Structures are given as C-alpha cells and as structure tokens.
C-alpha cells in the first residue's frame, strides 16, 4: 500500500523514476528500525531517521489517498504502526537489560 502510494505520488508529480521514492523511504524506515533496536548508545540519530521517514511516508500516503477522512486514516496506519511497534520492541529489549543489572 505505502509503496504504491508513494510511487504514484512521485509519478503524478513528474519524477522520472517514481519507484525510487518509496524504495528510499521504506528502506530508510527498515534500516532506522534495525538501528534503534541494535544500538545501545547514541540512538538519537536512528530515532530521528525513523520519525522523519515515518512522517514522509504518512504525508505521502495521506496526500495520495482519495481525500476522504477514512481513506486518510487508513493511509496513515502502516507507517505509524511501524513507529509504535519499533518503540515497543526497543522497550522490550531494554527490559531484559534491566533484569540482568538487578
């Protein structure tokens, strides 16, 4: 859904290689997600990239939707869900660290 929406938005706005936009945004989200989980210190940059790429994905998906409220909400869900799931995964991985230090 997100890939098609971002590619369609890029194509509609004259981007000559429209599949590159969702590739960059979606791969950026995956790499930033992995980094937030893997890094123990200095995670601020990974979180910044994850939030920024999620915002770009949400904005593009909502813009490409048909404009009804329900379509815009549905379009925003995937990127926001990934952001929330990443935060939860980081919280769970850190919980294990707390147990070992006690």
Image (tube, rainbow, N blue to C red):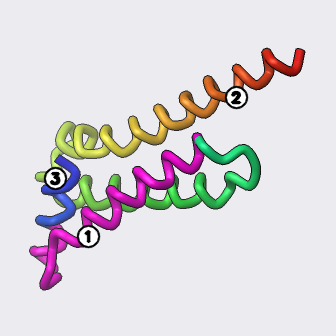
Q: Secondary structure at mark 3?
A: loop
How far apart are labels 1 and 3 at the CA level?
Answer: 17 Å
Q: Which residue is mark 1?
A: 21
How far apart are labels 3 and 2 at the CA level?
Answer: 37 Å
Q: Is residue 61 magenta?
A: no
The image quarter containing residue 71 is top left
Give the mark nearest the N terminus, 1 or 3: 1
Q: Which residue is mark 3?
A: 65
Mark 2–mark 1 CB contact (< 8 Å): no
Give the mark nearest the N terminus, 3 or 2: 3
Q: Which mark is residue 60?
A: none
> Dot 2, crowdedness within 10 Å: few (<14), some or many (≥20)?
few
Mark 1–mark 3 CB contact (< 8 Å): no
Which marked residue is nearer to the observer: mark 2 or mark 1? 2
Q: Nearer the viewer, residue 84 or 96?
A: 96
The image quarter containing residue 12 is bottom left
Q: Nearer the viewer, residue 67 or 44?
A: 44
Q: Position of residue 45 (x, y in %)?
A: 64, 60
Residue 67 in sight in this render: yes
Q: Position of residue 88 (x, y in %)?
A: 55, 28
Which marked residue is nearer to the observer: mark 1 or mark 3? 1
**Residue in the image at 18% along x and 73% along y:** 10
> Dot 1, crowdedness within 10 Å: few (<14), some or many (≥20)?
many
Q: In the rendered view, would you say 71 is above or below 13?
A: above
**Residue in the image at 34% along x and 53% along y:** 58
Q: Which residue is mark 2?
A: 94
Q: What segment carries the magenta color? A: 9-37
Which marked residue is nearer to the observer: mark 3 or mark 2? 2
Q: Position of residue 26 (x, y in %)?
A: 32, 56
Q: Nearer the viewer, residue 22 or 5?
A: 22
Q: Is residue 25 magenta?
A: yes
């Amino acid at each position: 859904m997100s890939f098609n929406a971002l590619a369609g938005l890029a194509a509609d706005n004259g981007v000559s290689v429209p599949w590159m936009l969702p590739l960059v945004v979606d791969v950026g989200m995956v790499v930033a997600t992995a980094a937030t989980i893997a890094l123990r210190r200095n995670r601020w940059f990974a979180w910044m990239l994850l939030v920024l790429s999620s915002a770009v994905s949400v904005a593009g998906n909502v813009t490409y939707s048909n404009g009804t409220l329900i379509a815009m909400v549905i379009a925003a869900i995937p990127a926001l869900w990934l952001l929330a799931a990443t935060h939860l995964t980081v919280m769970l991985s850190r919980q294990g660290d707390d147990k070992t230090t006690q």
